[in-house]
Image: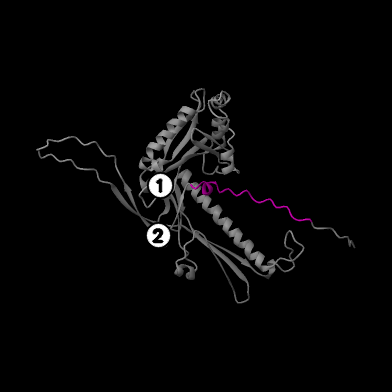
Amino acid sequence: MDFKYNDFTGVFTKPFGNNFLIQELGIFQEKHSDTPKIETDDLRAGKISVAESVNRYGTELIATERDLATNRLLEIPHWVLSGEVDASLFQGIRRPGTQRQQNMDELVSDESIRQYMKFRTTKEDVLARALFTGVVNAPYTQQQVVDFSEEFGEDYSSGVIDVGSTGPLESLDTAATALRVNLGGWVKALRGIVVLCDPTFYKSVKYHAEIRTLVAHGVLPQSTLFNSAVRANLPAFSAFELDGLVFVNVIGYEDYLAAGSAVMVPVFADNIIPSDHTPLEVVSGPASRNAKIAAAGTRAEFFLYGFDDRLGNKTVMAEFGVLPLIYDLSMITKLTTSTGE
């Protein structure tokens, strides 16, 4: 029998590379509803035409344009998570990274963290699908699927970026200008424009000969390709800034973003427009499985709670609702590339 003693030096952990880019960029403004369904008014101001002059003493009159209003009722999709902690999970089982047995409190804490991470992962998936495809899957709600183009009557704008001999700068400027025009009065609240790129699109713009030549001759600063400020804000992603546009290489979103494409998205400042809504929102809902929390009217985007059975076994539960809303898809531009040949 071997009675040698070895010192336990610790544990190396490699966490999974969870990707919460869209949440971190703050593209969707957070809102909360106290009810499972929300009712919203969509008010659209039309273009104001120039008035013609009239005979000062005549009877002619000029009418003004009225805004168009539409009322909509939508239900917030809901998720519920659950995990059990009993004696079989800690008796005779060593706690990783220690020389002692697991204990119940640690296991409850671990389960709580796992449920929160599942919430963040699920929310990122829902936001990405809404942003890149304009759809929210809601199978247990009255609408089943929310298609923003059908619901609000607008579709994505589109643009083609020249990555051939001409170079991308002019076509990028054209696309960004068109996006600002589509924002209408919301352009006053614009904080910036982010271009979420497939890796192929990202490299075709960043390393294009036109960009490298302009950097080499000092027309564009070296920070165009090596921007420490952008890297500081998005350390986990490859990103660069060009002519006021921030390009982000969104590896891990292949399920939503086609190869060789990108999405140009406006990011708004705090709501400075006299409106209850911003063009891109995500609405969280109330707790519904736990009657005490529901009756208390507690507001949160994520509800976590637990309880014991008569034998002391613990159940950890969480619930949350996520409903992204994009009121006008024309404010988002889908980009593809062309070699101009």
Discs 1/2, front = 1
SS at circle 2: strand
Q: Which mark is residue 279?
A: 1
Q: Position of residue 177 (x, y in %)?
A: 41, 33
Label 2 crowd bin: few (<14), some (14–19), many (20+), radius 10 Å: some
Instruction: Report whether 314 appears left or right of 326.
Output: right
Q: In the image, is residue 162 above or below residue 273? A: above
Residue 220 magenta-drawn? Answer: no
- The quadrant where residue 86 appears: bottom right
Instruction: Report whether 95 appears left or right of 336.
Output: right
Say whether marks 1 and 2 touch (CB < 8 Å): no
Q: Which residue corresponds to the image point at 37% horizontal and 49% vertical from the top-left?
A: 151
Amino acid bearing label 2: Lys
Q: Position of residue 232 (x, y in %)?
A: 59, 42
The region drawn magenta spans 9-26
Can residue 133 be seen from the camera position used here?
Answer: yes
Q: Which residue corresponds to the image point at 36% horizontal and 40% vertical from the top-left?
A: 184
Q: Residue furthest right?
A: 1
Q: In the image, is residue 202 above or below residue 295? A: above
Q: Position of residue 120 (x, y in %)?
A: 55, 54
Label 1 crowd bin: few (<14), some (14–19), many (20+), radius 10 Å: some
User: How was the colour assigned to the protein in this rendering?
Assistant: one colour
Circle 2 sits on which residue? 37
Dominant secondary structure of the residues highlighted in magenta in the image: loop
Q: Report how far apart the C-alphas of labels 1 and 2 lie in the structure.
A: 19 Å
Amino acid bearing label 1: Pro
- Quarter of the picture containing the N terminus is bottom right
* Number of numbered callouts drawn: 2
Q: Which mark is residue 204?
A: none
User: Which one is in front, 158 or 104?
Assistant: 104
